[in-house]
């Protein structure tokens, strides 16, 4: 009878040890997956920060180029206005010279 109880206890102990082993394995697997997920998260955050930095650089460059284009358009309009005034002045001078002849 004592050997039967000992055998049953050994059997239960074996089951408990197997369960403990399985739980330890699950714990280590979950811990490694957690660390991997944290690493992926940090990599994604770094990637997003790089994207935002690049986006902001492109936005600033685009704004600077747009300001340059607006300055060129303003200069073109001023030159056009000056040219029209000079042509009008030239026509008046030619007309005045023709009247003097």
Image (tube, rainbow, N blue to C red):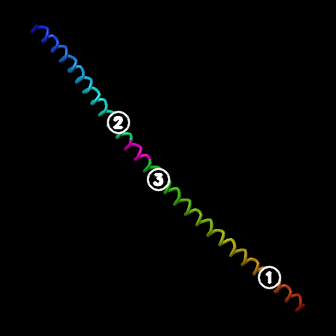
Q: Position of residue 74 (x, y in %)?
A: 65, 72
Q: Eyeballing the image, is 21 above or below 94?
A: above
Instruction: Please give the range of residues in magenta.
Output: 41-47
Furthest residue toward front: 1
Identify the main secondary structure in magenta.
helix
Secondary structure found at label 1? helix
Q: Nearer the viewer, residue 34 or 82?
A: 34
In the picture, the disc for residue 88 is: 1
Frontmost of labels 2 and 1 is 2
Judge the density around disc 2: few (<14), some (14-19), many (≥20) Cα neighbours within 10 Å.
few
Q: Is residue 100 above or below residue 14?
A: below
Quarter where residue 32 is shown: top left
Residue toward you, 97 or 26: 26
| Label 2–label 3 contact, CB within 8 A | no
Residue at 15% in and 10% down: 7
Mark 2 lies on residue: 36
The residue positioned 53% from the left and 58% from the top of the image is 59
Disc 3 is placed on an element classified as helix
Above or below residue 47? Residue 7 is: above
Q: Earlier in the sequence, mark 2 or mark 1?
A: 2
Tell me the number on the disc at residue 52.
3
Circle on res. 15: none
Identify the residue shown where x is 84% and y is 84%: 94
Q: In which image quadrant can residue 29 be found?
A: top left
């Amino acid at each position: 009878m004592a050997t039967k109880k000992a055998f049953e206890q050994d059997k239960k102990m074996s089951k408990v040890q197997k369960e403990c082993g399985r739980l330890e394995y699950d714990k280590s697997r979950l811990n490694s997956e957690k660390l991997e997920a944290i690493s992926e998260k940090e990599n994604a955050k770094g990637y997003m920060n790089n994207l935002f930095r690049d986006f902001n650089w492109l936005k600033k460059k685009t704004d600077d180029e747009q300001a340059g284009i607006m300055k060129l358009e303003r200069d073109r309009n001023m030159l056009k206005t000056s040219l029209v005034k000079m042509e009008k002045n030239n026509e008046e001078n030619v007309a005045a010279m023709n009247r003097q002849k």
